Every structure is written in C-alpha cells, then in structure tokens.
Amino acid sequence: MIAKLKQHLLNILGRGDPAHPYIVHAHRLRRAVLRTDRRLRSDYFYKTTNPKLHIGGGWQLLEGWLNIDVDLIPGVMRMNATRRFPFADETFQYVYSEHMIEHVPYKKGAYMLQECYRVMRRGGVIRVITPDLSAILGLHSRERSAEQERYLHWFCQTFVPERAPSSASAINAMFRLWGHQFIYDDQTLADAMRFAGFNSVIRCPISHSGHPDLQNLANEQRYPEGLLDFESVTLEGIK
C-alpha cells in the first residue's frame, strides 16, 4: 500500500507547474509519507555534538547546521518559525537567521526570538541579520554619501528598473516587495532580543563575529561588495 502511494505521488510530482497547489500538496504529502523532516532532524542530531540552527535560509544551506525553512526545499527541514519549535529546551549552541525576520509581523518575530531563546543552551549565541531601517531611510537625505549613492543606484536598477533611481522608489520597494512585514532598526531589534531573554546584545559587521562558528555566514555574493553590509543590521545576543 505504501509503495503504491509513493509511486502515485511520484507520478503527480513529475507533471505540471511545481508551484501549483496540487503539486505543493503532493510534495508535502510525499515528505509526510517518507518522514523526510523527521529523518533530517534525527540524522543531524546523530552526527553532531555542537547543534546549530539556521532559520529561514531558503536554498542557501549552511554545512554543519540544521537548515530549516517554511518552504519545501530538498535537504531542508520544513518548519514554521513563527510557531512553537519542535525541539526540546536548551538544544542548540548557536542560532542564525539572515534576512528572514522582516518577512513576518513584529509579534510573530518576537515569538520566534522567544522560541530561539527557549531551544538554546545556556551561553549559546544567536545572530540575526535583517534590513536596517536607518540605512534605508537615510537614502532620503538631501546630501548622500558615495556609499549611499552606490547602493541607491544599484538597488533601483536591480529591483525597480522601470523608474529612474530615487530614494522614494528604494524605500517603497524595501517595504512593499518580497513580502516584508516589519523593517527594524538596531534599537528595535535589540529591544526585541532582550525582551526574549538575550543579554549582551551587540552589533557586528555582517561577516565578522567573536565566535568562529558565526563568522562569514552571510550570503553576500548576491549583492555587490559591501552593499549587503550597508543595507543590513547584524546583532548577536547571548543566552
């Protein structure tokens, strides 16, 4: 019976638009039948003594980390980070999330941070990267720096090419494109992390950390050199 169901699912998955609701449902059902997410989780914990959780990285998988995402991605455990995490208290030494928290409303982001705190070990470190509201709003200044001009020109040419480069276009795009729900500045994000329980919250350059496991994790290749750092705020906190 299971073999026939597996073959039926494979037949469905081999046809049609992969984003079609029926295809998505078939992928989910197939993963449930094969217990894919449970296997990914158990295999990861079997192989590591230094558990590290990577939240919402999409197709950007990190070696040595348990990669989780809400989307169906091969090799990635499917998990909704705005709900209770399926992990015991004090499981992970490190938690990392890059440009994900802005995709959920503030209250859900705050809950995610609380869950991160719960599943982290004492002395564990969380690292969160997200667009920086101060940097984005700073583009609307009458006198912009060379770095601001470089970012503005590239951003508009890349994401809003139908209009001439302008700060208004860039700011609106940051709030309206990609499903963004809440854009943080460093103070707002730091307050949310402290409310979740983290202490010693500090800002870091995007690829540098006092913890070797958290260095050079950002997907900077998708932006010209230096621009992802300009756009982002990177905070670390300790449990």
Image (cartoon, rainbow, N blue to C red):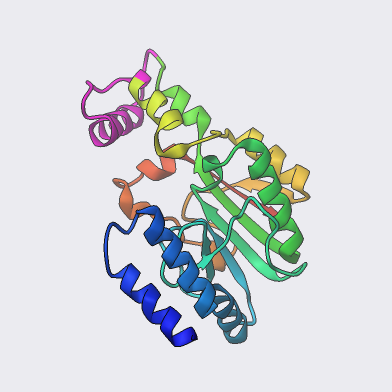
State left or right for residue 93 relative to residue 24.
right
* Most foreground residue, 104 or 163: 104
Q: Is residue 59 left or right of residue 187?
A: left
Where residue 44 appears, as percent x and y from the top left, is 57, 79
Which residues make up the magenta segment?
A: 142-168
- Please provide percent x and percent y for residue 207: 46, 55
Q: Which quadrant, please, contains the C terminus? A: bottom right
Q: Foreground: 176 or 210?
A: 176
Out of 108 and 65, give the one closest to the viewer. 108
Residue 160 placement, left or right of 177: left
Residue at position x 61%, y 54% in the image = 81
Count of residue discs: 0
Residue at left offset 43%, top offset 44%: 229
| Magenta-drawn stretch contains 39 | no
Question: Which percent across, then down, holds residue 29?
Answer: 49, 69
Quarter of the rendering containing residue 145: top left
Q: Position of residue 182 (x, y in %)?
A: 56, 34
Name the residue rendered at 57%, 50% in the picture. Answer: 128
Q: At 44% across and 87% down in the image, what residue appears?
A: 3
Report the side of 119 relative to 104 (left or right): right
Q: Is 144 included in the stretch rendered in magenta?
A: yes
- Looking at the picture, does residue 222 appear above or below residue 78? above
